[in-house]
Every structure is written in C-alpha cells, then in structure tokens.
Amino acid sequence: MSRLSSVFLPTNEYLGILWTLAGIKDVAVINHGTAGCNFYELVTASKRTRELIYNRFASTSLEQEDIALSGGEEKLRAIIKEIAIKDHVSLIVIVSNPVASLIGVDVEAIAREVAPNIKQPILSFNNKAWKEDAENGVEEALFSLIRFYCRESSEQKACPVGGTLKANIIGPTVETFNWSADEQELRRLLGLIGIDVNTVLTYETMTEKLKTIANADINIVSRAVGLKTARYLEEHFGIPYIYGLPYGEKGTKEWMKQVAEAVKKEVPANGFVNDRSFSFHHYIEMISGGEFFQRKWTVALSCPPAMAKGFAQLVQEDWGFPLEAIRLTSTPKDSELEELEALGVKRVFVTPDELEWKSVLKEIKPFILMGSAEDTTLVKEAPVQLRITPPAYDRFTIYDGNPLVGWAGYQSLTQELFNQISRYALR
C-alpha cells in the first residue's frame, strides 16, 4: 500500500467525531460495537487524540453472542452507568458503529431509559464509524454539540455599545496543524480590535464553555466544517460570522478590517498597520545577491480550501513568486474556486489522487513546495519544503512561537523560507 494512504485515501466519519470530542476535556465517548472496530478506530487516530481521550473512552466490545442475542444492550447500559459515576465527566456520547446499527440497536432509546438514573446528559451518533471523510464527522459533531447546548431562540442579540466583545473560533480540533501557535496570534490580533476569545470549538474547551457560545458577538470559522454551525448561530442568535483565517501581510490587514466591520467597530483611518513589519526585499537581496540566484522561484501549494486563497495571495502578492499549481485537499465551495481564479491561479486540482498530483509536481518541478510531509514524498527533490498542513511527522512543534496566521505567521514562515533557500545555496 502507498505511504500516502493516510492522505489520498478517505478517512472515516468516526475519526472526525473523535477528533472533535477529544478537544472537550469533560466528555466521555462510548463506542457501541465490536472490539475489532474499536481497535481499528483507535490505532488510526492520531497520537495526540489518543493522549487526550484515553481516560474518557470506552467500548462495549460486542462479541458473537451479544450480536446474536441482545445487540449488547445490557453491556451498553452497564458501561453508561460505570462512566456516569466519574466526577470529571459532564457529557456522555455514544457512537454506534455499523455492526450495532445493522442489527438495529436503538441507542437513543437506551439513553432515554438510563437518563433518569444518571447526572450527565447523553448525546448519540448512529452508524458513523465507516462512512467516508472525517471532515463530515467533524461537521456533524460540531453541529450536534451546538444544537444540544444552544437551543433555538427567537431573540436577536445586539452587539454592546462599549466594552470588550467576545468571539468564538469554530473549526479547530485536535488534529489541526500548528494550532497552539496560531491561536496565540489570533488572540493577539483580535485583541487589537477589542475582542476576546470566548472559546474554541473544540480545542481545549469544556462543556460549560459550550453553553456560553450563543453569547458571543462574532464567530470566526477556520474551516468549511464549521460553516453549518456558524449559520445556525447566526439564524437563531443573530451572531455574524466570517470564514477563513489571516495569512500574509496583505491578507491579515484585509481580515482584520472584515472582523472589525462585522462587529461594527470603526476601522482606523489608515487601516490596520503591521506591527511585526520587516523588510522582505532586503532579505531577498541578501540571498539573491551572491553567487546563488534562483531565477524561477516556482511554487506548488497543497492545503484545504479555507487556506488556499490566503496562501495564494501570500505567495503571489507578498512574496511575488509564481504559483504554478494548487492541490485542494477537500471539496471547495464555488465561491472559493472563483476567488482562486480571480487571483490568477490557472491550475487548481480538487482532491486529486496520488498519481495525478505526483504527475503535476513532476511536470512543474517546484522550487518551493508548501504542503504536508506526504506531499514531500512525491517530490523529495524540491529545494524548499514548507510545512503548512498535517501530516507533519518530519517536524517538531516543541515551541508554540511559530504561527502560520497573522503578521507573526507571515514573518515566521518567511524566515523559514529564507533559511531553507540559504542552506540550498551553500550546498
């Protein structure tokens, strides 16, 4: 099997649900199904996911007699009661895998039966273990959690006239690459506008925080899987949202203006000025002025649609390099494709298979490859390889001071670019 199977073959919805729930520190998950399915689902989850959820995960581990006689209903009742006595658990989630669904186990009926005898509420997901695409699992888990904790309301909340506003960030989960560093920069940028982060759905949060989501003044959606949730919150609670994160110098200015306008904050007369500025052209001259000069700094980009516009703008407008091709790792909205076309990107590939993308990279021979460690496997000879998406197993993230977003992210990524170019020149 190809080494790239983790990227180019589909993941499953169960993993997306697990990623989402792992970021809520007082949620316990019960997998109602066979031991084999339970084993597969955990070994295919990331190490980070397992670390976060190891003491909050259980399985009914159905055997043949359970399937033939009772569907394991007694096992499920017993494990719910066992988890319910744990003080650190505030919500119990049951995920029914295909075996349990096939034999017709009604986990919702069992949850209703047990509910009067335990202190925690129960949320259930039916037959979500093997359907393709983890992104679908993240989307459904986010939406289900919000509908569970934020019931529909006809009240429209107005933004306060003065004081600090609140923002939710919707989309990051435990598999999100480089999030700790990115979150710090986002908090800093939002603070410049007078906005505090209420919570991140669902990264290092608690169920008590989920109950306050409807009190925010704006939602920042970091990836497409959060749009369904953001639209629900806009419709029922009047909370505006913006989609996408800031990348590059120009992109960050535009993003901050968009956020400010969404919460009716006055934009400074001269706009938002980069407070982490540096002379890009000065460093370009330094690495180009000696014996080494790379005349065609072609770039290939591989990332989700929510990142593509920002990084395309960074490459072409901030760096001034030709962007030859983009691989979108998930299906974009029509508007996202139009935005990329407006930026002059001619070759955009939507979820290409491994051989197709390998053929593209072989043809364009990128000098700079921006993507994951798996993209590097296809074109190891690319002189500059910038990690912007998972998997990134060839990079350590011990220090959370190297973001990708915002002005600090632009400076950090540009520094890594220059360092790699300089090393290449000295070979």
Image (cartoon, helix red, strand yellow):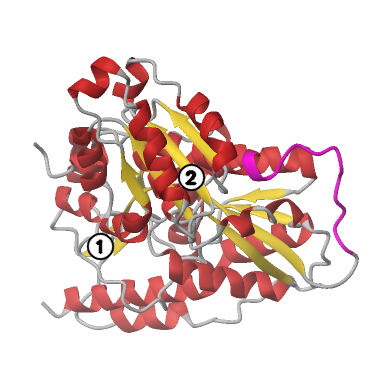
Tell whether 228 sits left or right of 40: right
- Which of the marked residues, 2 or 1, is nearer the chain's N terminus? 2
Residue at point 45%, 21% (across, down)? 106
How far apart are labels 2 and 1 at the CA level? 42 Å
Q: Quadrant of the C terminus?
A: bottom left
Q: Main secondary structure of the magenta part?
A: loop
Of circles 2 and 1, which is in front?
2
Q: Which residues are magenta?
A: 148-160
Image: 164 above or below 357: below
Where residue 177 sits: x, y (%)? Answer: 37, 59
Callout 1: SS: strand
**For mark 2, what is the residue?**
92
Name the foreground residue: 257 vs 37. Answer: 37
Q: Is residue 66 above or below residue 348?
A: above
Query: Which residue lies under the disc numbered 1?
Result: 385
Is residue 304 visible in the rendered image? The answer is: no
Three-letter residue code for mark 2: Ile
Q: Residues within 10 Å of mark 1 (few under 14, many from 20)?
A: many
**Mark on residue 355?**
none
Relative to 309, is 54 on the left or the right? left
Residue at image coords 23%, 33%: 37
Tag 1: amino acid = Gln
At label 2, counting other C-alpha atoms closer than 10 Å, the crowd grade (few under 14, some 14-19, many 20 or more) is many
Q: Nearer the viewer, residue 427 or 83?
A: 83
Q: Quadrant of residue 383?
A: bottom left
Residue at position x 22%, y 61% in the image:
393
Please provide percent x and percent y for residue 33. 29, 30
Left or right: 345 in relation to 327: right
Say which quarter of the image contains residue 284: bottom left
Indicate whether 170 appears above or below 246: above
Viewer-proximal residue, 242 or 214? 214
